[in-house]
């Protein structure tokens, strides 16, 4: 059985502590910042598509450019000495960092005069 607690109140914190006290020896416990949410992911991919259409490019290319600007890249030299780069992944981002992808995409969309849907319809504030 698995429990996930997003600590938003003292009551939730107590429930978390009780679950921890009841956990059998050998259990794994992970504590960290809140990960990106499904509504964030859905909304970002939606506005990426709208923005890519206005930009005149495909979604994957725009996604690459935005992630490169917001998250940065890993650079290394391969065995032949050629410089390689990989855009950092968004899979393990916190909700706060994933918001940066959304905000940057909204800025790009604004420059392209895109009308984007209200994020509240997708479960975002």
Image: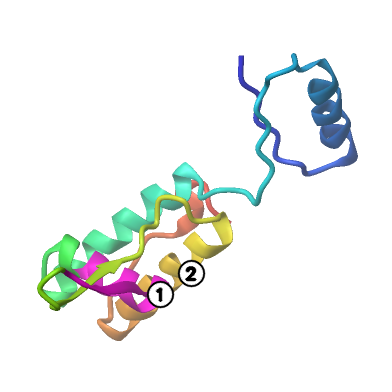
Write down the residue under mark 2: 100
| Image position of 60 with respect to 17: above or below | below
Placement of the N terminus among the 4 image quadrants:
top right
Task: Residue 22: give x, y in percent of width and height.
Answer: 82, 15
Q: Residue furthest bottom?
A: 111
- Give the residue at x 52% y 64%: 97
- Give the residue at x 84% y 42%: 9
Task: Residue 11: give x, y in percent of width and height.
Answer: 88, 33
Placement of the C terminus among the 4 image quadrants:
bottom right
Q: Is residue 1 left or right of residue 54?
A: right
Task: Residue 5: give x, y in percent of width and height.
Answer: 70, 34
**Along the line of sight, the residue nearer the viewer: 45 or 85:** 85
**Along the line of sight, the residue nearer the viewer: 24 or 42:** 24
| Image position of 80 with respect to 9: above or below | below
Q: Residue furthest front?
A: 79
Write down the residue under mark 1: 70
Region in magenta = 62-78
* Snapshot quadrant of residue 118: bottom left
- Give the residue at x 27% y 62%: 48
């Amino acid at each position: 059985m698995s429990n996930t607690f997003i600590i938003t109140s003292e009551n939730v914190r107590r429930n978390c502590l009780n679950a921890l006290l009841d956990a059998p020896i050998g259990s794994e416990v992970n504590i960290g910042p809140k990960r990106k949410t499904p509504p964030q992911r859905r909304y970002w991919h939606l506005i990426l598509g709208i923005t890519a259409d206005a930009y005149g490019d495909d979604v994957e290319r725009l996604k690459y450019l935005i992630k490169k600007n917001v998250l940065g890249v890993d650079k290394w030299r391969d065995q032949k000495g050629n410089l390689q780069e990989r855009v950092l992944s968004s899979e393990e981002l916190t909700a706060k960092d994933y918001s940066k992808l959304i905000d940057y995409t909204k800025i790009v969309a604004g420059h392209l005069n895109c009308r984007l849907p209200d994020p509240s319809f997708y479960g975002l504030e």
